[in-house]
Image (cartoon, rainbow, N blue to C red):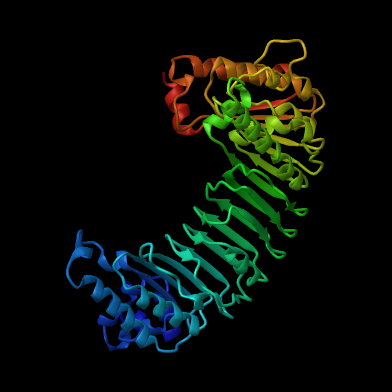
Amino acid sequence: MDRISNLPDEVLCHILSFFTTKEAALTSLLSKRWRNLFAFVPNLDIDDSIFLHPEEGKRERDGILQSFMDFVDRVLTLQSTYPIKKVSFKCKTGVDSSRVNHWICNVLQRGVTKLDLFVGLGDDYLLSSEIFISKTLVEMKIGSGVKLEEWDGEVSLPMLRTLVLDSVEFCFDKFKMLLCGCPVLEKLEMFHIEWEDWEETLLSASLKSLKIDSESCFERFSFDTPSLSFLDYSEFVAEDYALVNMENLVDARINLLVTEDQIKRAREPNNDLVEDDEEEEDVVLRFGNVKKLMSGIRNVKKLFLSPTTLEVLSLSCEAMPVFNNLKFLAILSHVDLGWQAMPVLLKNCPHLETLALWGLVHYVTDKCGDACDCVSREDKGRSLISSPVKKLHIKAFRGSIRELRMIKHFLYSFPCLEEMEIHAEENGPTKFEVPGIFDLVVELMVLYNELTSCDVRFMVCDSLYEKWTSQ
């Protein structure tokens, strides 16, 4: 301990910065040398669950939360006006909201650059409006049911580059105000957001990376983000995408969420009732407007599509844009969702080099037969003949007859195919549990290597290889 204690204050404070504030404060008991060092640590990590750890039921004891709040007050008083860089506040119901806001204002006044707030204090908690005025904040995370709806002042975050919002509630126009006050924002992530305005435009000239995963049902959602290069979008299909300005997008991951009823109405129109006709027309129009979203991302080089997205695209095939820059396309499949849009999608990727398929089994329709081996007809697979795909990666292979037929179909239909990687499923049931099946599949892959010019590789993790070959 003496060797450590003899280190310079700056080094000791750097070491303490890797501890929670509670752990750093406990070092003050070691000796006089350590008594006040934790007060000069540039990081502050306040978590009431760590303060209450490890005793179960400690939170409900009389005076325990008061003790926690007093502890935080003492820490901040001891630190006084000493500069601070990174701060994390994690508090749950029972902590005084006014004191939490006082803590937040304290670190803002001391020039904090990174601030994480996870303050689940209940529906009545309103975040202090002072958090939206800071000349030093570079990164901020806000979560756990915070309401961002009551501030009336300005938003001025001239240095903020990263913003993460989790389980936050917005009311009318507050989201627009927030973005307008972040002129250099580059990364925005939003999870489980509650919106009161069902027509929203995400407007930011500086934004480069965007992730949205909140399962909201918008009437209209627009993107005016000309500098965006990365998009990860998971939402229910909006009624309309009035504006999609993403000319510089490079990497996109699209997961359009739909209900089972919407899928049913899109596939099998029910004309028995007028009400059904109206609902069917709404679904067709809604899904058809996805063409605007796809047209807006047409410049991407890498594209990931979920099973529901591919199903939705089946109603906008005629308006599918040409993806001239697309080099890598990944498709996730599901046994209950179709590949109707696959033929048109492949035809509209004239420079595609790598196709990755997470699963091969899908809902069979007559339209998917143009790309796969599901439907027996003379022109099956014709959309593959003109495809320039050189590499095909197949994930979650389970060894079924249907999958093997698809693999053979791809080998003989893609004219430019040079490499095929087949990755065995690692986390679910497969046909390889049946004795002898694994060896038969391996032999078949060896045969494909001999009969075709494609390099076929069957990828299996070591533990499963030992298990399946020992049967």
Q: Specify the quadrant of the image occupied by residue 205.
A: bottom right
Whole-percent x, y for residue 320 in the image: 77, 36
**Location of the C terminus (image quadrant):** top left
Q: Quadrant of the N terminus?
A: bottom left
Relative to residue 468, is residue 199 drawn left or right? Answer: right
Residue at (25% x, 66% y) in the render: 52
- Up the image or down, 282 lies above or below 171; here it is above
Taking depth in this image into account, of 289 and 433 the one nearest to the observer is 289
Residue 16 image position (x, y, % from top left): 39, 76
Q: State whether residue 260 is above or below residue 200.
A: above
The residue lying toward the viewer, choosing from 115 and 23, is 115
Could you tell me which residue is drawn at 76 percent across and 24 percent down? Answer: 414
Residue 35 percent across, percent down from the top left: 30, 86
Q: How many marks are shown on the rendered structure?
A: 0
Q: Can the viewer see residue 459 in this picture?
A: no
Q: Is residue 145 left or right of residue 174?
A: left
